[in-house]
Amino acid sequence: MPRPRLDPRELEQALAALPGWSLAGGKLHREYRFADFNAAFGFMTRVALEAERLNHHPEWSNVWNRVVVDLVTHDSGGITASDVALAKRMNALAG
């Protein structure tokens, strides 16, 4: 069963509590920068373990020290509480 999408007010409140995140193309979006490739890849590894635990996986890419992330719940057709939870966890893991 699809998770409920956040309504515009809920989404606005969620963004206010997610430093560094914005809306882009109907998705939560953020770019992280790290000291080097090892730090970026280490972050992605930690997030992958958390994403698997949450059963919610990011759209992301990595080029050297940069990790670009988009979060959306495809089966719900928009942003859900699961996206917000993963974004919060990613911010915590990024330090």
Image (cartoon, rainbow, N blue to C red):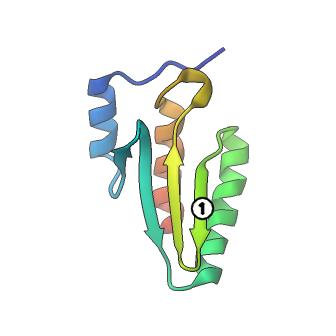
- Identify the residue at horizontal 73%, vertical 46% (top origin): 52
Q: Residue furthest top?
A: 1
Tell me if residue 22 comes above or below residue 79 in the rendering.
below
Q: Quadrant of the N terminus?
A: top right
Tell me: 9 left or right of 80.
left
- Identify the residue at horizontal 60%, vertical 49% (top origin): 59
Q: Nearer the viewer, residue 62 or 88?
A: 62
Tell me: 89 left or right of 8.
right
Q: Position of residue 81 (x, y in %)?
A: 48, 31
- Identify the residue at horizontal 40%, vertical 40% (top origin): 25
Q: Residue furthest bottom?
A: 36
| Residue 42 occupies quadrant | bottom right
Tell me: 16 left or right of 40.
left
Q: Position of residue 77 (x, y in %)?
A: 52, 24
Tell me if residue 37 comes above or below residue 90 in the rendering.
below
Q: Position of residue 16 (x, y in %)?
A: 27, 44
- Identify the residue at horizontal 71%, vertical 44% (top origin): 53
Tell me if residue 49 comes above or below residue 41 in the rendering.
above
Please give the count of numbered marks on the rendered protein: 1
SS assignment at label 1: strand
Q: The residue under label 1 is which amino acid type?
A: Ser
Tell me: 69 left or right of 2.
left
Q: Position of residue 74 (x, y in %)?
A: 59, 30
Crowd around label 1: few <14 · some 14–19 · many ≥20 (10 Å): few
Q: Nearer the viewer, residue 13 or 37?
A: 37
The residue identified by callout 1 is 61
